[in-house]
Protein backbone atom coordinates (compact mmCIF):
# COMPACT_ATOMS: atom_id res chain seq x y z
CA UNK A 1 0.00 0.00 0.00
CA UNK A 2 1.33 3.48 -0.84
CA UNK A 3 1.03 5.91 2.06
CA UNK A 4 1.52 9.65 2.41
CA UNK A 5 1.92 11.52 5.64
CA UNK A 6 -0.58 14.05 6.96
CA UNK A 7 1.12 16.42 9.39
CA UNK A 8 -0.46 19.38 11.21
CA UNK A 9 2.86 20.50 12.75
CA UNK A 10 3.47 23.38 10.32
CA UNK A 11 -0.02 24.74 10.87
CA UNK A 12 0.25 24.55 14.66
CA UNK A 13 3.74 26.06 14.78
CA UNK A 14 3.33 28.89 12.30
CA UNK A 15 -0.28 29.61 11.31
CA UNK A 16 -2.55 28.95 14.28
CA UNK A 17 -3.69 32.23 15.82
CA UNK A 18 -7.11 31.27 17.24
CA UNK A 19 -8.90 28.17 18.50
CA UNK A 20 -12.20 29.76 17.50
CA UNK A 21 -12.23 27.74 14.29
CA UNK A 22 -12.08 24.51 16.25
CA UNK A 23 -14.56 24.64 19.10
CA UNK A 24 -13.49 21.87 21.44
CA UNK A 25 -15.92 20.31 23.90
CA UNK A 26 -13.88 21.84 26.72
CA UNK A 27 -14.12 25.33 25.24
CA UNK A 28 -17.80 24.92 24.37
CA UNK A 29 -18.47 24.37 28.09
CA UNK A 30 -16.32 27.27 29.26
CA UNK A 31 -18.85 30.15 29.36
CA UNK A 32 -20.92 29.85 32.52
CA UNK A 33 -24.07 30.71 30.57
CA UNK A 34 -23.21 28.36 27.69
CA UNK A 35 -26.21 26.63 26.10
CA UNK A 36 -24.15 23.42 26.31
CA UNK A 37 -23.84 23.51 30.11
CA UNK A 38 -27.60 23.91 30.44
CA UNK A 39 -28.37 20.56 28.79
CA UNK A 40 -26.08 18.54 31.05
CA UNK A 41 -27.07 16.87 34.29
CA UNK A 42 -24.44 18.98 36.03
CA UNK A 43 -23.83 22.54 34.78
CA UNK A 44 -20.06 22.53 35.46
CA UNK A 45 -17.02 23.10 33.29
CA UNK A 46 -15.33 20.30 31.34
CA UNK A 47 -12.35 20.11 33.72
CA UNK A 48 -14.53 19.96 36.83
CA UNK A 49 -16.63 17.15 35.39
CA UNK A 50 -13.64 15.17 34.17
CA UNK A 51 -11.92 15.58 37.56
CA UNK A 52 -14.97 14.30 39.42
CA UNK A 53 -15.27 11.36 37.02
CA UNK A 54 -11.59 10.37 37.34
CA UNK A 55 -11.83 10.67 41.13
CA UNK A 56 -14.09 7.60 41.14
CA UNK A 57 -11.30 5.46 39.67
CA UNK A 58 -8.10 7.20 40.67
CA UNK A 59 -6.89 8.48 43.98
CA UNK A 60 -6.35 12.02 42.68
CA UNK A 61 -5.29 13.29 46.10
CA UNK A 62 -2.10 11.23 45.79
CA UNK A 63 -1.13 12.75 42.46
CA UNK A 64 1.70 15.30 42.51
CA UNK A 65 3.02 15.69 38.98
CA UNK A 66 0.66 16.06 36.08
CA UNK A 67 1.48 16.65 32.44
CA UNK A 68 -0.98 17.99 29.90
CA UNK A 69 -0.04 17.67 26.26
CA UNK A 70 -1.73 20.08 23.84
CA UNK A 71 -3.71 21.97 26.46
CA UNK A 72 -5.24 24.58 24.12
CA UNK A 73 -6.39 27.55 26.19
CA UNK A 74 -5.46 25.87 29.49
CA UNK A 75 -8.95 25.56 30.98
CA UNK A 76 -8.77 21.83 31.76
CA UNK A 77 -5.55 22.23 33.74
CA UNK A 78 -6.89 25.35 35.48
CA UNK A 79 -9.81 23.28 36.80
CA UNK A 80 -7.57 20.43 37.96
CA UNK A 81 -5.20 22.80 39.80
CA UNK A 82 -8.11 24.66 41.38
CA UNK A 83 -9.64 21.41 42.65
CA UNK A 84 -6.28 20.03 43.74
CA UNK A 85 -3.78 22.84 44.52
CA UNK A 86 -1.13 20.32 45.59
CA UNK A 87 -0.67 19.17 42.00
CA UNK A 88 2.28 20.52 40.05
CA UNK A 89 1.75 20.84 36.34
CA UNK A 90 3.69 20.92 33.13
CA UNK A 91 2.15 21.96 29.83
CA UNK A 92 3.77 20.86 26.57
CA UNK A 93 2.41 22.33 23.37
CA UNK A 94 3.64 22.68 19.80
CA UNK A 95 1.85 26.01 19.26
CA UNK A 96 3.59 29.18 20.50
CA UNK A 97 0.27 31.01 20.30
CA UNK A 98 -1.58 28.49 22.50
CA UNK A 99 1.29 28.04 24.93
CA UNK A 100 1.13 31.79 25.59
CA UNK A 101 -2.61 31.53 26.16
CA UNK A 102 -1.96 28.72 28.67
CA UNK A 103 0.58 30.92 30.49
CA UNK A 104 -2.10 33.59 30.91
CA UNK A 105 -4.80 31.15 32.07
CA UNK A 106 -2.47 29.40 34.51
CA UNK A 107 -0.49 32.35 35.85
CA UNK A 108 -1.85 31.86 39.38
CA UNK A 109 -0.66 28.23 39.55
CA UNK A 110 2.57 26.31 39.97
CA UNK A 111 3.09 25.29 36.34
CA UNK A 112 5.90 25.12 33.85
CA UNK A 113 5.65 25.28 30.11
CA UNK A 114 7.50 23.69 27.21
CA UNK A 115 7.17 24.57 23.55
CA UNK A 116 7.66 21.27 21.72
CA UNK A 117 6.21 18.73 19.35
CA UNK A 118 5.34 15.94 21.76
CA UNK A 119 6.69 13.28 19.41
CA UNK A 120 10.11 14.97 19.53
CA UNK A 121 10.27 15.04 23.35
CA UNK A 122 12.57 12.48 25.00
CA UNK A 123 10.11 9.91 26.47
CA UNK A 124 12.46 9.40 29.43
CA UNK A 125 11.29 12.82 30.67
CA UNK A 126 7.69 11.53 30.95
CA UNK A 127 8.41 9.05 33.70
CA UNK A 128 8.27 11.64 36.52
CA UNK A 129 4.57 12.26 35.93
CA UNK A 130 1.81 10.46 37.86
CA UNK A 131 -0.90 11.52 35.42
CA UNK A 132 -0.72 12.53 31.75
CA UNK A 133 -3.70 14.04 29.91
CA UNK A 134 -4.27 14.56 26.20
CA UNK A 135 -7.63 16.00 25.22
CA UNK A 136 -8.68 16.47 21.60
CA UNK A 137 -5.27 16.29 20.04
CA UNK A 138 -4.48 12.67 19.12
CA UNK A 139 -6.10 13.43 15.75
CA UNK A 140 -3.55 16.22 15.20
CA UNK A 141 -0.61 13.83 15.36
CA UNK A 142 0.75 12.42 12.09
CA UNK A 143 -1.53 10.11 10.12
CA UNK A 144 -0.58 7.79 7.32
CA UNK A 145 -3.02 8.58 4.55
CA UNK A 146 -3.87 6.76 1.38
CA UNK A 147 -3.59 8.39 -2.05
CA UNK A 148 -7.28 9.45 -2.15
CA UNK A 149 -6.75 11.84 0.82
CA UNK A 150 -3.43 13.34 -0.25
CA UNK A 151 -3.05 16.90 -1.45
CA UNK A 152 -0.22 18.91 -3.05
CA UNK A 153 1.60 19.19 0.32
CA UNK A 154 1.47 15.50 1.23
CA UNK A 155 4.91 13.88 1.37
CA UNK A 156 5.27 10.17 0.69
CA UNK A 157 5.80 8.15 3.89
CA UNK A 158 9.49 7.53 4.57
CA UNK A 159 10.94 4.04 5.07
CA UNK A 160 11.42 4.95 8.73
CA UNK A 161 7.69 5.65 9.16
CA UNK A 162 6.75 2.51 7.26
CA UNK A 163 9.05 0.54 9.58
CA UNK A 164 7.11 2.02 12.52
CA UNK A 165 3.88 0.80 10.96
CA UNK A 166 5.31 -2.72 10.65
CA UNK A 167 6.41 -2.52 14.30
CA UNK A 168 2.85 -1.71 15.45
CA UNK A 169 1.27 -4.36 13.24
CA UNK A 170 3.65 -7.08 14.38
CA UNK A 171 4.25 -6.26 18.04
CA UNK A 172 0.59 -5.63 18.90
CA UNK A 173 -1.02 -7.78 16.22
CA UNK A 174 -3.09 -4.84 14.95
CA UNK A 175 -5.29 -5.31 11.89
CA UNK A 176 -3.94 -2.27 10.03
CA UNK A 177 -3.72 -1.63 6.32
CA UNK A 178 -6.16 -4.41 5.39
CA UNK A 179 -8.47 -1.99 3.62
CA UNK A 180 -6.96 0.00 0.76
CA UNK A 181 -8.73 3.22 1.84
CA UNK A 182 -7.75 2.96 5.50
CA UNK A 183 -5.78 5.83 6.99
CA UNK A 184 -3.64 4.96 10.01
CA UNK A 185 -3.21 6.97 13.24
CA UNK A 186 0.52 6.35 13.39
CA UNK A 187 1.28 9.38 15.64
CA UNK A 188 -1.46 8.48 18.12
CA UNK A 189 -0.15 4.91 18.40
CA UNK A 190 3.40 6.20 18.85
CA UNK A 191 2.53 8.53 21.73
CA UNK A 192 0.39 5.93 23.52
CA UNK A 193 3.21 3.42 23.29
CA UNK A 194 5.74 6.00 24.57
CA UNK A 195 3.54 7.02 27.52
CA UNK A 196 2.89 3.40 28.51
CA UNK A 197 6.54 2.39 28.15
CA UNK A 198 7.47 5.38 30.35
CA UNK A 199 5.41 3.65 33.05
CA UNK A 200 3.05 6.53 33.84
CA UNK A 201 0.54 5.39 36.43
CA UNK A 202 -2.53 7.13 34.97
CA UNK A 203 -3.21 8.32 31.43
CA UNK A 204 -6.32 10.09 30.16
CA UNK A 205 -6.90 10.37 26.39
CA UNK A 206 -9.93 11.92 24.67
CA UNK A 207 -10.55 12.50 20.96
CA UNK A 208 -13.07 12.03 18.15
CA UNK A 209 -13.47 8.40 17.30
CA UNK A 210 -14.14 6.45 14.12
CA UNK A 211 -15.64 3.68 16.26
CA UNK A 212 -18.14 5.71 18.30
CA UNK A 213 -21.61 4.21 18.86
CA UNK A 214 -24.85 5.75 20.08
CA UNK A 215 -26.51 4.05 23.08
CA UNK A 216 -30.04 2.67 22.57
CA UNK A 217 -31.97 5.47 24.36
CA UNK A 218 -30.29 8.11 22.17
CA UNK A 219 -30.69 6.23 18.88
CA UNK A 220 -34.10 7.74 17.99
CA UNK A 221 -32.54 11.22 18.17
CA UNK A 222 -29.02 10.93 16.82
CA UNK A 223 -27.46 9.38 13.75
CA UNK A 224 -23.74 8.95 14.22
CA UNK A 225 -21.89 7.59 11.23
CA UNK A 226 -18.80 5.65 12.36
CA UNK A 227 -16.91 3.95 9.59
CA UNK A 228 -14.51 2.03 11.84
CA UNK A 229 -11.56 3.49 9.94
CA UNK A 230 -10.07 6.97 10.54
CA UNK A 231 -12.21 9.64 8.88
CA UNK A 232 -10.78 12.86 7.46
CA UNK A 233 -11.95 16.16 8.96
CA UNK A 234 -11.03 19.33 7.08
CA UNK A 235 -10.41 22.31 9.33
CA UNK A 236 -8.94 25.76 8.89
CA UNK A 237 -5.38 25.35 7.53
CA UNK A 238 -5.12 21.61 8.27
CA UNK A 239 -6.79 18.23 8.16
CA UNK A 240 -7.09 15.80 11.00
CA UNK A 241 -8.37 12.24 11.38
CA UNK A 242 -10.70 10.49 13.79
CA UNK A 243 -9.09 7.85 15.98
CA UNK A 244 -9.37 4.08 15.86
CA UNK A 245 -9.46 3.66 19.63
CA UNK A 246 -9.41 -0.14 19.52
CA UNK A 247 -5.77 0.00 18.34
CA UNK A 248 -4.73 2.33 21.19
CA UNK A 249 -6.62 0.16 23.65
CA UNK A 250 -4.81 -2.97 22.47
CA UNK A 251 -1.39 -1.31 22.71
CA UNK A 252 -2.10 -0.18 26.28
CA UNK A 253 -3.46 -3.60 27.31
CA UNK A 254 -0.45 -5.40 25.90
CA UNK A 255 1.77 -3.02 27.87
CA UNK A 256 0.03 -4.07 31.09
CA UNK A 257 -2.51 -1.27 31.50
CA UNK A 258 -6.14 -1.72 32.42
CA UNK A 259 -8.39 0.29 30.14
CA UNK A 260 -11.66 2.07 30.78
CA UNK A 261 -13.25 3.26 27.54
CA UNK A 262 -16.42 5.18 26.76
CA UNK A 263 -17.89 8.30 25.21
CA UNK A 264 -17.60 11.82 26.64
CA UNK A 265 -21.28 11.48 27.61
CA UNK A 266 -20.12 9.17 30.44
CA UNK A 267 -18.58 12.09 32.30
CA UNK A 268 -20.75 14.79 30.72
CA UNK A 269 -24.17 13.14 31.14
CA UNK A 270 -26.92 14.65 29.07
CA UNK A 271 -30.41 15.49 30.29
CA UNK A 272 -32.66 14.40 27.46
CA UNK A 273 -35.24 17.15 27.97
CA UNK A 274 -37.99 18.07 25.52
CA UNK A 275 -35.87 21.02 24.40
CA UNK A 276 -32.96 18.71 23.54
CA UNK A 277 -35.22 16.15 21.86
CA UNK A 278 -36.81 18.86 19.71
CA UNK A 279 -33.43 20.30 18.70
CA UNK A 280 -32.24 16.83 17.68
CA UNK A 281 -35.42 15.77 15.88
CA UNK A 282 -36.19 18.73 13.62
CA UNK A 283 -34.71 18.45 10.12
CA UNK A 284 -33.29 21.99 10.22
CA UNK A 285 -32.60 24.07 13.33
CA UNK A 286 -34.75 27.19 13.79
CA UNK A 287 -32.21 29.14 15.84
CA UNK A 288 -28.58 29.28 17.01
CA UNK A 289 -29.31 27.53 20.29
CA UNK A 290 -30.78 24.49 18.53
CA UNK A 291 -27.79 24.36 16.21
CA UNK A 292 -25.36 24.53 19.16
CA UNK A 293 -27.24 21.77 20.99
CA UNK A 294 -27.21 19.49 17.95
CA UNK A 295 -23.47 19.87 17.44
CA UNK A 296 -22.71 19.47 21.13
CA UNK A 297 -24.81 16.31 21.56
CA UNK A 298 -23.19 14.86 18.44
CA UNK A 299 -19.76 15.57 19.97
CA UNK A 300 -20.71 13.99 23.32
CA UNK A 301 -21.11 10.66 21.55
CA UNK A 302 -18.57 11.07 18.73
CA UNK A 303 -15.75 11.67 21.23
CA UNK A 304 -14.34 8.74 23.15
CA UNK A 305 -11.97 8.57 26.08
CA UNK A 306 -9.53 6.02 27.40
CA UNK A 307 -8.41 5.92 31.00
CA UNK A 308 -5.30 3.79 31.29
CA UNK A 309 -4.19 2.53 34.69
CA UNK A 310 -0.81 0.85 34.96
CA UNK A 311 -0.79 -2.73 36.10
CA UNK A 312 -4.36 -2.66 37.41
CA UNK A 313 -6.15 -5.68 36.05
CA UNK A 314 -9.10 -5.40 38.44
C1 LIG B 1 -7.85 20.96 19.18
S1 LIG B 1 -6.72 21.62 20.31
C2 LIG B 1 -7.29 20.94 21.85
C3 LIG B 1 -7.01 21.87 22.98
C4 LIG B 1 -7.48 21.42 24.36
N1 LIG B 1 -6.87 20.21 24.80
C5 LIG B 1 -8.98 21.32 24.41
O1 LIG B 1 -9.52 20.21 24.56
O2 LIG B 1 -9.65 22.36 24.30
C6 LIG B 1 -5.22 20.71 19.99
C7 LIG B 1 -4.07 21.08 20.91
O3 LIG B 1 -2.98 20.19 20.72
C8 LIG B 1 -1.80 20.91 20.40
N2 LIG B 1 -0.95 20.06 19.55
C9 LIG B 1 -1.24 19.64 18.30
N3 LIG B 1 -0.23 18.88 17.83
C10 LIG B 1 0.69 18.78 18.82
C11 LIG B 1 1.96 18.14 18.94
N4 LIG B 1 2.47 17.42 17.94
N5 LIG B 1 2.66 18.29 20.10
C12 LIG B 1 2.16 19.04 21.12
N6 LIG B 1 0.97 19.68 21.07
C13 LIG B 1 0.24 19.55 19.93
C14 LIG B 1 -2.33 22.18 19.76
O4 LIG B 1 -1.40 23.23 19.71
C15 LIG B 1 -3.52 22.47 20.67
O5 LIG B 1 -3.13 23.04 21.89
Image (spheres, rainbow, N blue to C red):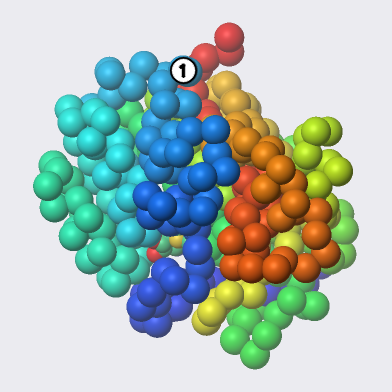
Image quarter for residue 92?
bottom left
Question: Does the closest atom of ligand 1 sit within 8 Å of the Cβ of label 1?
Answer: no
Q: What residue is rendered at 35% in x and 65% in y?
A: 94
Q: Is residue 207 left or right of residue 115?
A: right
Q: Secondary structure at mark 1?
A: loop
Q: Where does residue 93 sit, x and y in percent of width and height?
A: 33, 59
Callout count:
1
Crowdedness of circle 1 by 10 Å Cα count: few (<14), some, many (20+)? few
The answer to whether residue 276 of the structure is visible from this angle is yes
Q: What residue is rendered at 42% in x and 69% in y?
A: 19
Q: Is residue 108 left or right of residue 289?
A: left
**Residue 16 higher or lower than 253, as above or below:** below
The residue wearing badge 1 is 56
Q: Where does residue 305 sit, x and y in percent of width and height?
A: 58, 39
Q: Where does residue 110 sit, x and y in percent of width and height?
A: 13, 42
Ligand 1 shown in quarter: bottom left
The answer to whether residue 186 of the structure is visible from this angle is no
**Residue 292 higher or lower than 37, as above or below:** below
**Quarter of the figure with the C terminus:** top right
Image quarter for residue 232?
bottom right
Amino acid sequence: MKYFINSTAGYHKHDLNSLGWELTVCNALEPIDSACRKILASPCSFGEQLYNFLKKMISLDDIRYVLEIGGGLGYLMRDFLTLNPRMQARMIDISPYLLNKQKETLKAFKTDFELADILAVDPASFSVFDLVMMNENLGDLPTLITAQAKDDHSEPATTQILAKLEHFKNKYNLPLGLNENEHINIGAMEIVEKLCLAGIQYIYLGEHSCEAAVPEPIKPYLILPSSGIPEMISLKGHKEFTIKFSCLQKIAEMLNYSVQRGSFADFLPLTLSDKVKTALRIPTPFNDEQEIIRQFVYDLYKYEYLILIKGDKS
